[in-house]
Image (cartoon, rainbow, N blue to C red):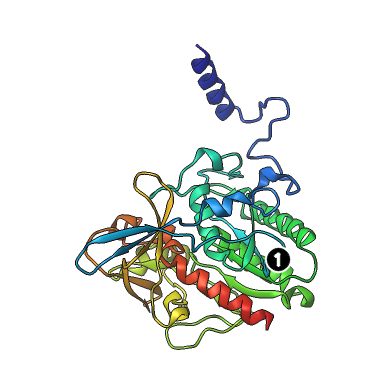
Amino acid sequence: MGNRDSCLAGCLRRLWPWRRLEGQILPGDPPDFSLPTYWLAHPGHWPRRVAENLPKTICGLQPDGTKTCEATDQYSDSQSSEVAADLFYLHGTMEGMGNRASIDRYDKEAFQSKAFNTRHQMTIVTAFTSACRAYAPLYRQAAMGGSWDLAYQDVLAAFEQFLSEVGSERPIVLAGHSQGSLHIIRLVKERIQGDPALMRRLCAVHAPGMGQWMEPSPLPVDRAPDDPPTTPAVAIWAAATPEADRKWTLIGFMSRGAGFRDFANPCAWTNGEHLGVLLPDDDTKLPVLHRGLVQRAEVVDGLLRVHPASADGTLTKLHMGHHDYHAYDVHLFWANVRERVKQQVAAFRT
C-alpha cells in the first residue's frame, strides 16, 4: 500500500506542480545559486562528482577487432584551489517542456547511451577538468514552449554567483553544449566582452553542438583544418558521420541549413591523433575510455565528420538518426578536449 501511495503522490505532483511538500524545491522555482541543489558540478558542494565521472578503465580496439581493457589511475582531477583555472559549464537541454531545472536527479541516473541526462552531462564536464575546477549550474533551461530569455537570466545569475566565489584573479574557461553553447554566446556578448578585466581572464571558449558564433568575435575562432590553434580561442564543432547531410542534422535545423564554416577539429590539437572516446560500460554504466574507435576526423561541408577505425558498429549506435552525433559531440573527442584545455591553461599562465 505504501508504494502505491507514494506513486500516487508522485503522479499528483507532476499533474499539479504548484502543490508542494513543506520546504520542497520544485524544478520551476527561481534558482538560488547559493544552494547546492542548483549545481550539477561545484568544487565545494559536489567535489566527488568529477572523480565519479572520470574513466577508471581504458579499452583498446586493435585493427583485427580484438579488444583489451585495463584499469587506469591516469585520470584524477583535483578540485582544490591549487588547480590553475575555473570552468563555467552550461549543459544542454535535458527537459521536455517549458523552463525547468534538472535538480535532484544526479544520484538517480546512470551514464548510458541514448540517455541525455545529468550523468551524461557530468561526463562532458570532465572533458574540461584537466586543468580546471568545475562549476556547472542547473538553470531553468528552455525546452519545448520555454523562454530562452528566462533561461538566460538564470545563466547570468549563476555566472555572477560563480564570479563571487572564484574571486577576481583566476583564469576562466567557458564551455557548453547545444543549448548551453547558445547561452555562452549571449553571456560573452552581453556580460563578458564589455568588461576588460573579465576578458583578460578568459583562457578559452568551447561551444560545441551549435552552428553559429558572434561576429565580430572578441576572441579568435579556432579554425580547421589548416590554421594552427590559437590561445585563447573559441572552438565550435558539431560531429556527424561521413555520410551525413548537414540540412538533416540538428544544427542544420537550428541554423536553417547554413551551418558554421569554421569548425574546429579536436584532432588538430593533438597533431592529427585521436586520443579516445568516453562511453559507458555496457554492464556497469561507468565511464570507459575507448581507444582505436576513430580513425580520423575532418571538417567537410560545415560538419566535423568522424571516420570510424573499424566496422564493429560502436559509433554507429551513437548517432541520433540522420547520421548526427549531436549528443556525443564532446564524448567522441573527450581525451583530445582534455589535452587542449590543459594546453590552453598552461599557455595562458606563461
Q: Residue at x 71, y 43 (%)?
A: 30
Q: Is residue 279 left or right of residue 79?
A: left
Determine the secondary structure under disc 1: loop
Q: Position of residue 163 (x, y in %)?
A: 76, 62
Pick the residue in front: 221 or 231. 231
Three-letter amino acid code at the position of disc 1:
Glu
Residue hosting label 1: 82
Pick the residue in front: 74 or 135. 74
Q: Position of residue 298 (x, y in %)?
A: 36, 78
Where 103 sits versus 225, above or below?
above
Total numbered badges shown on the rendered structure: 1
- Tell me the quadrant of the picture where the C terminus can be found: bottom right
Where 318 sits versus 185, above or below?
above
Q: Residue at x 53, y 75 (%)?
A: 340
Q: Is residue 237 visible?
A: no
Residue at the top extreme, as displayed:
1
Q: Is residue 88 visible?
A: yes
Q: Residues within 10 Å of mark 1 (few under 14, many from 20)?
A: few
Quarter of the rendering containing residue 259: bottom left
Q: Residue at x 69, y 60 (%)?
A: 80
Q: Is residue 344 left or right of residue 86?
A: left
Q: Residue at x 38, y 63 (%)?
A: 249
Q: Position of residue 3 (x, y in %)?
A: 50, 17
Where 302 sits versus 69, above or below?
below
